[in-house]
């Protein structure tokens, strides 16, 4: 017989509507990006942007690449801005956001500038490799991509996150020591526990173990610290530490490496086909073909989304199991899951199709049921 806790409160019409709108926003964003890439290629506008970049007066391939990336980013941002604006208002409509309009605009500007910096570096490196190692560019680019992913994973907590949020060392010494000891039991040395000032922008709650090596740290949203008991916070963090114990970061990088290798191989094939058969571009190093490269990766990501999400859900279940085994009782885990669902307006029981395609985490109902099943067998 199913217990009341397993079933939990039914999803409210508000939660279902909010999540349905969020899904359609994601679909629209993807469709818009796909349409932009296809139109740039089919209409020849990508070549026009390339020529415009060259007409700047600087006879520099690298500078032309930068101008092309900048124009492409501006077009993309102009097209997506209405959806971003709607998303901002959606969070306020469902009382999930505290962010003021001025703060949102400033975040949009910062996000755009960060995008320009990283996109420019990546594209410059990509076409540098294509120009100098045309036969094996896709393999060299793949190796470089892996290095950049690992570097960003290490630098994100100290370089990227602080651009958008404020962090400070956790002042609750008792809770800090409790979480550090939990990390030590998991075999990871946590460099610090930080309070994440999420409430300045959102009413949602979250926590994470971020960084690699010397930058590994625990970040706890103030919305979590203010509304959850120490036992519930420990349960949430135990789950995050489960990812470390099961080497999910390394496994995730390995899986992503495999997917990316296929993506670069497919991009190489498509570029050669476009140059040799369709004569869309004069050479592989013609950066007007960038939308084709992006299109290949976008389609591949879309096709692999169910498989990647299934892999992620498997990892999440492993991390949950580690939490069950390393906290005194699964009770705080269950209450924290239900509170997070309510606070973040998540669907506890989405349809099987929605969970299979869109969700990187098992549904709250499944996670609670797993906790209760574990307690029934092992006690606690």
Image (cartoon, rainbow, N blue to C red):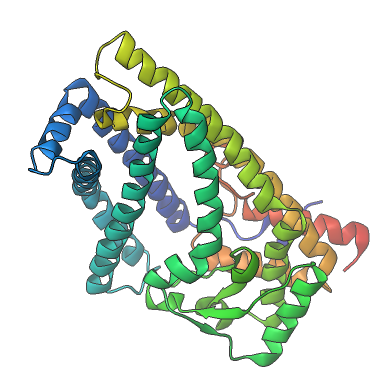
Report the residue that reaches farthest toward the top: 277
Q: Is residue 195 above or below residue 32?
A: below
Give the percent coordinates (x, y) of residue 34: 31, 32
Instruction: Say which quarter of the image contains residue 276.
Output: top left
Depicted 115 relative to depicted 214: above or below: above
Side (left or right) of 80 relative to 128: left
Please provide percent x and percent y for residue 302: 46, 32
Q: Quadrant of the C terminus?
A: bottom right
Q: Is residue 352 visible?
A: no
322 relative to 338 in the view: left or right: right
Spot occupied by residue 153 in the image (x, y as percentages of width and height): 54, 58
**Does residue 328 sit above or below 28 in this rendering?**
below
Q: Residue at x 44, y 18 (%)?
A: 269
> From the viewer's perspective, is residue 249 above or below residue 192?
above
Asked where in the image residue 279 lies, by quadrant, the reply is top left
Residue 319 makes an appearance in the image: yes
**Which residue occupies the foreground of this view, 341 or 215?**
215
Q: Is residue 279 left or right of residue 378?
A: left
- The total of numbered circles placed on residues is 0
In the image, residue 111 lies at what x, y percent?
31, 60
Please give the name of the residue rendered at 22% of the width and 38% of the height, measured from the top-left corner: 61
Depth check: give the residue in front, 61 or 164.
61
Report the residue at 45% width, 29% height from top: 137
Identify which residue is drawn at 56% across, 80% down: 194
């Amino acid at each position: 017989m199913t217990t009341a806790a397993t079933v939990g409160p039914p999803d409210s019409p508000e939660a279902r509507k909010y999540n349905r709108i969020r899904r359609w926003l994601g679909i629209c964003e993807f469709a818009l990006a796909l349409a932009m890439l296809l139109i740039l290629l089919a209409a020849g506008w990508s070549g026009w942007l390339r020529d415009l970049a060259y007409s700047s007066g600087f006879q520099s391939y690298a500078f032309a690449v930068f101008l092309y990336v900048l124009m492409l980013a501006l077009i993309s941002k102009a097209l997506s801005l209405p959806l971003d604006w709607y998303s901002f208002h959606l969070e306020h409509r469902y009382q999930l956001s505290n962010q003021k309009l001025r703060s949102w605009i400033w975040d949009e500007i910062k996000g755009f500038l960060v995008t320009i910096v990283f996109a420019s570096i990546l594209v410059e490196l990509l076409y540098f490799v294509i120009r100098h190692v045309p036969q094996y560019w896709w393999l060299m680019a793949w190796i470089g991509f892996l290095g950049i992913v690992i570097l960003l994973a290490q630098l994100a907590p100290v370089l990227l996150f602080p651009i958008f949020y404020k962090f400070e060392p956790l002042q609750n010494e008792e809770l800090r020591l409790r979480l550090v000891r939990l990390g030590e039991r998991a075999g990871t040395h946590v460099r610090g526990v930080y309070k994440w000032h999420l409430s300045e922008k959102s009413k949602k709650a979250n926590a994470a173990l971020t960084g690699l090596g010397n930058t590994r740290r625990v970040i706890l949203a103030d919305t979590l610290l203010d509304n959850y008991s120490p036992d519930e916070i420990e349960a949430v963090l135990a789950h995050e530490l489960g990812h470390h114990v099961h080497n999910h970061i390394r496994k995730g990088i390995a899986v992503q490496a495999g997917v990316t290798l296929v993506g670069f191989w497919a991009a190489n094939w498509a570029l050669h086909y476009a140059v040799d058969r369709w004569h869309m571009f004069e050479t592989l190093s013609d950066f007007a073909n960038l939308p084709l490269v992006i299109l290949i990766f976008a389609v591949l990501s879309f096709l692999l989304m169910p498989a990647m999400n299934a892999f992620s859900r498997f990892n999440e279940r492993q991390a949950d199991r580690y939490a069950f085994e390393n906290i005194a009782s699964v009770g705080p885990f269950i209450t924290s899951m239900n509170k997070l669902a309510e606070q973040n307006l998540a669907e506890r029981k989405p349809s099987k199709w929605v969970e299979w395609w869109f969700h990187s985490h098992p549904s709250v109902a499944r996670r609670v049921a797993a906790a209760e099943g574990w307690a029934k067998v092992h006690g606690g």
